Structures are given as C-alpha cells and as structure tokens.
Image (cartoon, grey):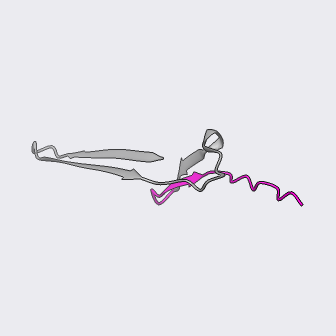
C-alpha cells in the first residue's frame, strides 16, 4: 500500500508552507487488499483496516 498526503498552510500575509509525505507498507501474505477500508479519526489519525484470510491447513 502506498499512502501519500499533502498539507498546505496559507496565511493571510501571503506566507505559506507545504508538507508532503509518501509512505509504503507491505501487506501480510494473505491480506485482501480489495477489501481495504480507511478512515480518519477525530484527532486526524489515518486508520487502514485490511482483512487477512488465514488459509486452511489441510491434514
């Protein structure tokens, strides 16, 4: 998964700052990326939930 974010802060005086981030995460082997869900919490934390399917062990 690649997460990219950009934040721009502009002041009435004309000053501004731009912050960018790009982060790469490896998923576990049996993760189902097509069922990924994400949301931002009230304190601005990004949460990503990815179900992991455990393969059955055949005996």
Provide residue 13's location: percent of width, then percent of height: 10, 45
Q: The C terminus appears in which quarter of the rendering?
A: bottom right
Vertical placement of residue 16 versus 43, above or below: above
Q: Is residue 27 left or right of residue 56?
A: left
Q: Is residue 24 left or right of residue 14?
A: right
| Residue placed furthest toward the front | 59
**Is the magenta region chiefly helix, strand or loop?**
loop
| Residue placed furthest toward the right | 59
Provide residue 26's location: percent of width, then percent of height: 49, 54
Q: Which residue is located at x 55 percent, y 53 percent? A: 27
Q: Which residue is located at x 51 percent, y 57 percent? A: 42
- Which one is in front, 8 or 52? 52
Provide residue 19's location: percent of width, then percent of height: 24, 50
Provide residue 40's location: percent of width, then percent of height: 51, 51
- Give the magenta part as a residue range: 42-59
How many discs appear?
Answer: 0
Magenta run includes residue 58? yes
Which quadrant holds residue 34? top right
Q: Which residue is located at x 65 percent, y 45 percent? A: 32
Magenta run includes residue 28? no
- Which one is in front, 12 or 45? 45
Q: Is residue 40 left or right of residue 49?
A: left
């Amino acid at each position: 998964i690649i997460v990219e974010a950009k934040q721009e802060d502009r002041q009435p005086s004309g000053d501004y700052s731009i912050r960018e981030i790009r982060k790469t995460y490896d998923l576990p082997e049996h993760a189902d990326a097509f069922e990924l869900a994400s949301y931002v919490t009230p304190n601005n934390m990004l949460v990503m939930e990815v179900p992991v399917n455990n393969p059955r062990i055949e005996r």
